[in-house]
Image (spheres, coloured by chain):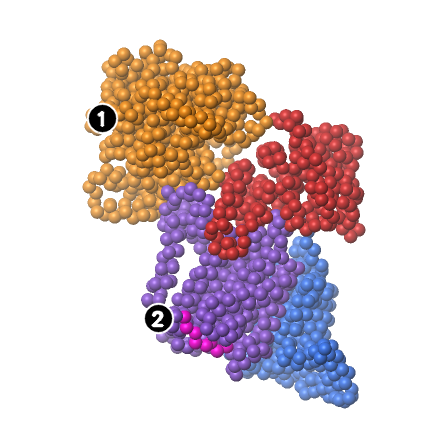
Amino acid sequence: MQSVDLGLDTLPKLLIHNAGAIGGRSAMRHKDLGIWQAWTWVQMLEEVRAFSIGLAERGLKRGDKFTIIGSNRPRLYWAMCAGQALGAVPVPVYADAVADEMAFVLAHAEVMLAVVQDQEQVDKIIAVSDRLPHLGQVIYDEPRGLKDYDHSRLIAFEDVQGLGRKKLASDPECLQLWQAGVAAAKGSDLSVILYTSGTTGRAKGVMLTYENTIVSARNANAFDHLDQNEEVIAYLPLAWVGDYIFSYVQSYVAGYCVNCPEAPDTVVQDRREIGTTYAFAPPRVYENILTLTTVRMADAGALKRKVFDFFIAVAGRWGQKILDGEKVPLRARLLYGIGNLLVYGPLMNQFGLSRVRVAYTAGEAIGPEIFRFWRGIGLNLKQLYGQTEASVYVTAQPDGEIYSDTVGKASPDVEVKISDSGEVLYRSPGVFAGYYKDPGKTAEVLTPDGWVHTGDAGFFDPKSGQLKIIDRAKDVGRLSDGTVFAPKYIENKLKFYPNIREAVAVGASRDFVCAMINIDLTSVGSWAERNNVVYGSYQELAANPQVYDMIARHIDEVNRSLAEEEVMAGAQIRRFLILHKELDPDDGELTRTQKLRRGHIIDRYGPLVEAFYNGAATAEISTEVTFEDGHKGVIAARLAIRDMQAYPARAAKLERAA
Amino acid sequence: MDILHKVFIDPFVQMGMAPDLLVQTLWDGLVGGVLYALIALGFVLIFKASGVFNFAQGIMVVFAALTLVGLHEQGVPAFVALGLTVVVMFMLAFGVERLVLRPLVNQSDIILFMATFGITYFLIGFGQLVFGGNPKVMIAQQLYLPSGAIEFKGLGGFVSLQKIDIAAVIIASVMVAVLAVFFQRTRIGRALRAVADSHQAALSVGISLEQIWVIVWFAAGIVALATGIMWGARSEVSFSLQIIALKALPVLILGGLTSIPGAIVGGLIIGIGEKLAEFYWGPLLGGGIESWFAYVIALGFLVFRPQGLFGERLIERI
Amino acid sequence: MRAPSSREAALGEVLLAVEDVSLAFGGVRALTGVSFDIRKGEIRAIIGPNGAGKTSMLNVVNGFYQPQSGRITFKGKERTSMRPYAAAEGGIARTFQNLALFRGMTTLDNILAGRALKMRRGFFWQLIRYGPALREEVEHRRRVEEIIDFLEIAAIRKVPVGRLPYGLQKRVELGRALAMEPDLLLLDEPMAGMNLEEKEDMSRFILDVNQQYGTTIALIEHDMGVVMDLSDRVVVLDYGRKIADAAPDDVKSDKNVIRAYLGEPHGVSV
Amino acid sequence: MLYREAGQYKTNYAADMAVFPILQDRIGMLVILLVAFVVFPLAGSDFTLNAVLIPFLIFSLAAIGLNLLTGYTGLLSLGTGGFMGVGAYACLKLTTFFPNVDIIIWIIASGFFSAAVGVLFGLPSLRIKGFYLAVATLAAQFFLEWCFIRIPWLYNNSVSGAIEVPLRTFMGIPITGPTATSLTRYLVVLSIVVAMTWVASNLVHGRIGRMWMSVRDMDLAAELIGIRLLRAKLLAFAVSSFYCGVAGAMMVFLWYGGAEADVFAIDQSFLVLFMVIIGGLGTLIGSFFGAALIYILPIALRAIPAAFGLPIHPAAAEQLTFVIVGVLIILFLVMEPNGLARLWQIGKQKLRVWPFPY
């Protein structure tokens, strides 16, 4: 399709171009001090330029690495571009990373300079500064509480901009020099290093060139007809490729406005105020909103609930068809129309989704009923499959070809193939330039002829022609008797129940499959309230027998459904327990993007796994946990283990009758 | 100077020159005052016990009198009618407690105040619906109330005292005495006084607040009835009376919202004061100053002694 | 977290001097010959057992009570009696032990109300609420938003304060006082009835106010721990008399103070 | 449900502090104005205009006036009738002395006279509160009533002792007096009420309103933040009486077309007070609700039996209304002490969070 026209092959160039072409339009907004502070492209260029030159004054040079740490704030996005304008390379880091994790990345990337949000991040950096020989300046956005800090290395964001503005005013050449610097950069230059908290081992620094990201962004915008009228809300971690592409590159390419929420916990409200038109979120988000809806509706009056349920049913029946433009009976259309007036419209509006043209979910499989619900009430929710190494886009679902269990067709300019071993491979202009300072790993993943190993096992669904992902290739194991065991597949089936937040299936080269469950505190908690089950803590609730019964029912259903697929029938869940603590990135149990680190978990909870297979009815476990403030403690518990019934393959239906 | 003379000299000269007129005026004022005092008494009873500023007291007077006369018109013998009226007043008290006070318990004062407006409107409408709106004559002689006047010479002229007025004064005094005894001696009376101080105290005496409210409203009703009879006997039974009843407000300002003796004294001051003012100073202003004189006195008091003559001092703390 | 050096530097000349002030209600003597001073930029604690006359002292300072005798010098100007609004105009703000918020108004309006003295646009402009009046409103709203952000109460911006939990109401009241941009801020038991977490927050706010805005603060507090952390100097009152006036640590060891507190149900928790 | 607020974001404080920040509300407001200015004049019969809408608007204005005093500043007043009267008589005198000046100007100007009187009788408010203040205002009420009766000069010594409204025109169109059509009078009243409501809303949403409310909610704290109580209270009395005065002037000149002193009797004060309480203390919209309920309801009540062809004696109807209004007042106080405006808010909130319960 399109390729980069050489004029606009870097982000700073795009910024300057936008300031000229659509300078008057809003480029960014930030809910701050009670209102949406807005910046036009012209204003944003000025801010970025001032900061950029300020950085130069502070000694940032071409090729230097600098880090960005904090939540989604305009200034942090500006910092990326400002650095890039000097030819320096931003290395955003997850704001919620613990100091140690952060130290590794910063040290590995040899960052010279840090732009951080507030005192919290400054403290973290100070804590590990002895491990960061290269780090010089630390620039902070919010001065709150930093007054009495030693400012020999600390400097405020606006002060840096001040330096820049002063320089600009005093030195006439300065501006030309800066622009020359921007012009000098090429699309093939390294633009950013994004550390993927890989599902195993230490994070790897994915190097992306301007070309990689800009081409992907162009194609993506063209694919969904995104233009400068879009409104998006930036709430996903800065350090994640998704946010980098959606909230930064695509915005620069399309010229649309990016909105930063007031605080992480006001996203829903803020999204509602802005009324975004292009949304992206991991399944979890759609799931949480749905859970929230059901919980809140549970308190509604009987009549209202009836109406709600009725029309949600209507939506489930007809909504998707209508959205896909299929033929439906007039009566259905009418009912749907009324439903839209009474329920769907208001509901979408409550969550600020009513203006959304395209909404994506990715990162994990999404529950079919969740997917159906949202599409049912008229949200154009689509799935895509992407990777940091690909600048996100590998496959995506075109409008009108939407399935809950596929991840779509190859994106524009992307080739996808399945290796003999069943692994998914792709090749595209977005393919990364390699892992930073790690040729070994690069070679493992990136073939000489430009194909990338995704490490995911998948296949093309014959009927839809779209890609289906089963699981991580290396995770697809076999039980001792040789039956296929795809833990992710089973876990997803479990996680589709609102009551189950996380599930870990074990069984590779064992006799049978067992599961460790995390209950969802929101929905189980509200269930507990409704049935006045008293509980003091997550641990207490998790240990409650009634909760066990509830989860047992879910697992039973899963077993039935597994029994109906002969491949999986052998991998039904025989035993399960409910974990005494929530799986947590701070304990390395989840990645920052909330993916399971199964291997780590299985080691960590070894005693439990043993108990599964030595038939014990209960198991002792004590685990070290990291609290928010970083200090560590130990949680001990005795967990009950439940046995489950397995159904013979295909015979499930008969069983059910009996 | 002429005006000063008119204001500060003439009236007193007149008083001196015609003491009989002075006495006559004083007497009229006294009687009027007694009736104000009776209405004020009703207010105080209720305010003391339930903290409600009962705006309906005035209309209760009219309503009671109307009921009495109305019943008699229907051919009910006078004293039976009197008895029935007492019953009606009790039912009223009961209804008010059930339908108004109880649902509004621990609402702000202004709300309760407004509620009594509601009661007022209701009683006006209801009274008229049942007994008709036009003025009626009090059945004085059927109740063996004296009529006619005692006249005696002296003071350089002659003074005439309406017997009904004398009766009014006596009955009023008796009623006050009875109430006083009731409050001082009886268990319920003490409970009522306790309520004024603290509701717990009242409960400790073993009487529920609801009962107390019914009792005070009933008591207020009886006072209203008596007032109505007297007033009716002097002039006539009509709704215009409720406006006059508002005079009880300045009386309360003077006497204090919670003091029975205050109500009496205040009533007398207002009654006599306004008669004197009307008779001796009124002409200077073209007469009719009765209608507001009382309030202006009250206003003066408010600015200089907000808690009234006998009311407890209200102090504000930070 | 705060280097002592910077503290000493912050202590300026005398802002408020109370000399030999006595106050009595009828027969009851609330204050007898109390003298002390508050210096620019310091956090001054007034402590003492219940009924020691702490609150009365504050009430004298900001004009609720008129002392029978004694001199009060504020910003170098002596004054014996003044109305509270005059004190406010003079730059004295105040919060109360038991909240004195405008319950019917939102958090925003409460704090905006604190700017009453700063808003000058005339009645006519208020009538049309346009042009200057609106510009003034906006400008002050901005200042108020900074305070809201500072006190981390953005979430309750438009909630009527009557509906807020106690802890938050305390914060709003502090916010209203801050909105007056006072030279002297009087806090009457800012942490009364708070849980530990709330206390920590409040302490942080008080310190930040003192540092960021350089506001002089006089506070009454029962929690000795808090007093010791926050204050630069402490006055101790007992039965309306001053029994000690020194740095926190010295006060702790002062025998008069200890004696005064031993009789107290809630003793010195240090 | 009707509210679709997604995409309504504020990029400046002016917009955020607007009286109607929500688009749907602004639309609703426009619709109402449209109906008031276009539909009613076209569709409304003489009776509707004369006996329903004009008085409704006038009472609404009076209610707003009292609400500024009682609802916003927390000062209870029973002198409304008197203050309205001052407006009416002032207007009469003004237009008698300067017949050529446009009457509308005088109607507005008469407000200043009642404002002055209001301030005078507001003076005690520094010392006294609540019922005591109410009695003080009663003094105003009765004294003023007395003046209206006893000072012939006020009603131009007319034999009837009543105000006789002279014919006054504006650009040739008769506005007051017998020949003025109800339509013109309606439009004049409507314009004045709309304008003054707008002004009132400006006041209460700005610094003045905050000053009053802080005095109402806690006068000590108000003084503490530098508010001078007496000024604040007197200002409230002045503005409040101004509104009442204008309402009174309009009542005589644009509605009755002539009136005696008893129009401004104590009952009038009570009536307006009901409107404020039932409508909702401290809300402007409540003033309209209250006026509608208290004034229009009785009309409806009288109309109902007629509608069913029941022959009911007007006097009886009158008395029945008294009973019903009385009951209603109590009923409302029991159900929603905060008045209709509160109910309105609750309903609106429900619509905003629909389909959720909260």
Q: Which mark is residue D272?
A: none
Residue at the extreme top: A440
Residue of label 2 = D45
Q: Quadrant of residue A72?
A: top left
The magenta span reads D163-170
Q: Amino acid at mark 1?
A: Met
> Mark 1 belongs to which subunit?
A
| Foreground pick, A550 / A189 | A189
Residue of label 1 = A1
> Mark 2 belongs to which subunit?
D
Q: Residue at x 69, y 48 (%)?
A: C63
Is-magenta flag for residue D271? no
Colour of chain C in the rendered structure image? red
| Foreground pick, A551 / A233 | A233
Colour of chain D in the rendered structure image? purple
Q: Residue B186: x percent and y percent?
A: 71, 64
Q: Residue at x 35, y 33 (%)?
A: A19
Q: Residue A193: x percent and y percent?
A: 38, 20
Give the position of the C terminus of chain C as an image quadrant. Answer: top right
Judge whether residue D58 can be spotted in this image. yes
Q: Which chain is blue?
A: B
Q: Residue at x 28, y 43 (%)?
A: A314
- Judged from the image, the secondary structure of the residue bearing numbered disc 2 is loop
